Image (spheres, grey):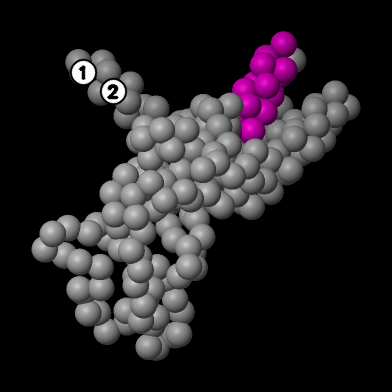
Amino acid sequence: MKLLERLPKSLRPWLFAVAWVFVYGGAVNLGFSDFFMALPFALFVIYAAAKWGRQYVFFTVLLVMVVVPLYYLKKTHSSVFYPAVGQMFTVSEDVCLVLHKSSYSGSEFVSVSLITPDRSCGSDKDSDAVRWVTLKAQTPLQIRQIKVSHADMGESYVIHTDSELGDVAFYGSEYTVWPDGRRIEQRELRRAIFYIPSILMYWPTGPIMLMALFKQ
């Protein structure tokens, strides 16, 4: 903290602006780290507001007014973050929807599998499969919700839609196409104005990337 107190006043607005941007990036981050990587910058902003004068208090309050609603919209999977919500799509091939019910918890979920000449819908007699239906190619479907999967610390977008068996989740671009037959790209499911700032949350890997760059 003593180092921050000794900062020249001419540098303070620039450092505060950088921290402001990183806090915004954390608030809109769709990655597995969520807001965590922005915490040091948030603490810096709070310190500046407490120690550096009224103008920093004003911009800190402004930052809170910006990031809190955005963070809420992100957590509620709003169409503000996911512009494809409400749009129509379809599947490129006939698929089988299977309703599973756990015999232990009673929870239900629907899985999606491809129908092939040697694998008809309902041929897999899993003990927890209670019902199955065929979803024909080009059947109109509507994107009800988009969520982000962080399997293996990655970032992939999951399309949720309604079916007669209930909620169906399509992972990535698995079987999904737009009504004109064009495959759905993940970049079309998110809004770039939020995604690009969220890349700042990779900042801890910066030294590693620089070392790899210099080695080349």
Q: Which residue is mark 1?
A: 215
Q: Quadrant of residue 69?
A: top right
The disc labelled 1 sits on which kind of residue? Answer: Lys
How dense is the environment of label 2, judged by Cα within 10 Å: few (below 14), some, or many (20 and up)? few
Q: Secondary structure at mark 1?
A: helix
Q: Secondary structure at mark 2?
A: helix
Residue 122, position in %: x, y? 25, 73
Q: Nearer the viewer, residue 28 or 147?
A: 147
Chain part drawn in magenta: 10-28
Q: Is residue 41 visible?
A: no
User: As drawn, which residue projects farthest toward the right?
Assistant: 54
Vertical arrangement, residue 109 with respect to residue 51, above or below? below
Q: Residue at x 38, y 73 (%)?
A: 99
Vertical arrangement, residue 26 with respect to residue 153, above or below? above
Residue 126 placement, left or right of 3: left
Q: Is residue 192 visible?
A: yes
Q: Nearer the viewer, residue 27 or 101?
A: 101
Q: Residue at x 75, y 35 (%)?
A: 66
**Mark 2 and mark 1 in contact (Cβ < 8 Å)?**
yes
Residue 39, position in %: x, y? 60, 42
How far apart are the alpha carbons under marks 1 and 2?
6 Å
Q: Quadrant of residue 216?
A: top left
Residue 190 placement, left or right of 100: right
Answer whether residue 211 is magenta in the image. Answer: no
Residue 150, position in %: x, y? 41, 51
Q: Which residue is mark 2?
A: 211
The disc labelled 2 sits on which kind of residue? Answer: Met
Residue 207, position in %: x, y? 36, 27
